[in-house]
Amino acid sequence: MSNPRTIVIIGGGFAGTTLARELDGKLPPDWELVLISEESYTTFNPMLPEALGASVFPEQVVAPIRQMLSRGRFIMGRVTAVDPAAKVLTCTTLAGETRVAYGHLVLAFGNRARLDLIPGSAEHALPLKTVGDAMHIRNIVLRRVARIELETHPALRKRLGHFVVIGGGFSGVETAGELIDCLESIRRYYPRVGAGELKVTVLQDRPRLLLELSERLGRAAQRSLIRRGVEVRTGAKALAVSAEAVTLADGTMLDTATVICTIGTQPNALVERLGLAVERGRIAVDADLAVPLAPGVWAIGDCAAVPNAFDGTVAPPTAQFAVREARTLAANLLATLSGRPTRRFDYRVRGQMAAIGHRKGVADLFGVPLWGLPAWLLWRAYYLSQMPKMPTFGRKLRIFVEWTWGMFFPNDITHLRFTRSQELAEAPQKAPR
C-alpha cells in the first residue's frame, strides 16, 4: 500500500494531467504524487472532429501521460471503490486489484457519453467522446462512400450518402464542418459517386448554432457551413433514431444510414458510489475546489460543479476552465500542505474558439471576433503552445510540421482495420468491415 502522505489524482484528462504537471517536483520531500487513469494517454477532445475527418492522424490528438511526469508515479487502472474514512481507494490494474492510501484525493475523471438520451440512439447513433469513436466513425464514413459505388438503388445510395450530426454546439459544428470538407476532399477517389450523393445535415434544437459564442460568430459559423453544402436545421429536435432514419419533433423523417450524436453526457459511475453531493450530475465543490464534508477530497474538471468567483456562475465543462481549475487547485494543495489559507477559483474567460472545417474557424479573443483562416490558425497555435497534451518541445515540433504539411494536401482515405493474421486465416471469406 502507498504512503498515506500521498496526493492521488484520478483522471488523465486536461484537469488531471495539468494538475499533475503543476505539482510534479514541487511537493514537500515526504509527499508522493500518484496519477491514476484508465488510459495511458490524455486525449485532446477538441481535435477529435479533425481526427474523424482525417485532417490529422490519431496520434496527434493524444499524448502519453508518463511523458508528462518526472517524479510523480502513474498507474494505469480503473478506480472501483473509495473509502473516505480510511482514505484508501481500490483500483483494477494489469496486475490485478491494487489498494492505494492517500492523504489528499483529487477527482478529475470527467464524464461519459450518454448513449440513450434519444430513443434508438444507443443502438443506432455514433457517439464522439474518444479517439476510438473518431476512428470508428471515420471508417464507417469511408465504408459508406465505398458502398455507394457498388449499389444501384437510388434510394439506398441517397441514404448511405446522408450523414446526420445531432447537436449544434462546439462538437457538433466542428464535426459537421470536418465531415463535409473530408467528403469533398476524398470524392475524387470514388469516381462512381456523384457530387450530389454526399450530404451532411446538422440538427440543433436551439435557435442558432454555437450558443457558447456570440451571436455574430454563431451566425458566421452557420453561413460557412451552408456555403460548403451543409444543411443546417435550427429549432429541429430529434425524437428518435433508427437504422434508416432520424425522426424530428415536427414529424419530418430524414433518411440516413449514419447518425453522429454529439449531445448528452452522464457522470462517471464512481460519482454515485462515492455518495457525494451533486449538482446536475456534477460533484458539488466549495469555492476553493474542496468537496464539502469530505476532508482531503477535491474535484475539478468536467466532473465538478465549480463556482466561479469572477461572475458567480458555475464554470462550464471546457478545456480552458479545466486547465485553470487545475492550476488553482495546485496552489491550494501546496498551501494546505504548508498550513497557508487556500484561495477561491476566480477566472475570466480570455476567449473561445472553434474549428469548423479544414482551414476554417471562428474565434472570440478578448471580445475581438475572427473567422475563416485567421481564426483556424489561431486555434491551432493556441492549443499547440498552451495545452497539456503537448508535453515536450520535440513533440510540439513534430506535430507542427505534420499540421503544416496537412494544410496543403488532401485528406487521408486509409481505412484502418487492424486485421490480425489469425483473423485472415480463420475467416478468409468474410466481407471487409
Image (spheres, rainbow, N blue to C red):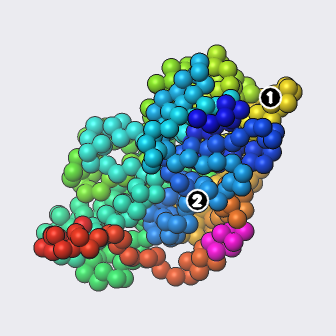
Q: Residue at x 23, y 70 (%)?
A: 422
Per the image, the residue denoted by label 2 is 64
Q: Is residue 341 above or below residue 200?
A: above
Q: Is residue 395 magenta?
A: yes
Badge 1 amino acid: Thr
Percent from the top left, x then y, of residue 14?
62, 48
Q: Residue 421 is drawn in which quadrant?
A: bottom left
Q: Is residue 206 above or below residue 69?
A: above
Per the image, the residue denoted by label 1 is 336
Horizontal arrangement in the rendering, residue 36 relative to residue 298 (left or right): left
Q: How far apart are labels 1 and 2 at the CA level?
A: 29 Å
Q: In the image, which residues are magenta?
A: 393-399
**Disc 2 on helix, strand or loop?**
strand
Q: Residue at x 54, y 31 (%)?
A: 89
Q: Residue at x 68, y 68 (%)?
A: 396
Q: Residue 355 is drawn in which quadrant?
A: bottom right
Mark 2 Cα within 10 Å, few/some/many (few <14, many 20+)?
Answer: some
Image quadrant occupied by the C terminus: bottom left
Badge 2 amino acid: Pro
**Disc 1 on helix, strand or loop?**
helix
Horizontal arrangement in the rendering, residue 4 relative to residue 428 (left or right): right
First-in-chain label (1 vs 2): 2
Q: Is residue 327 magenta?
A: no
Question: Toward the viewer: 7 or 113?
Answer: 7
Percent from the top left, x then y, of residue 244?
21, 53
- Dominant secondary structure (helix, strand or loop) of the stretch shown in magenta: helix
Q: Is residue 161 visible?
A: yes
Horizontal arrangement in the rendering, residue 125 relative to residue 216 (left or right): left
Percent from the top left, x then y, of residue 229?
42, 65
Percent from the top left, x then y, of residue 243?
21, 51
Q: Is residue 348 visible?
A: no
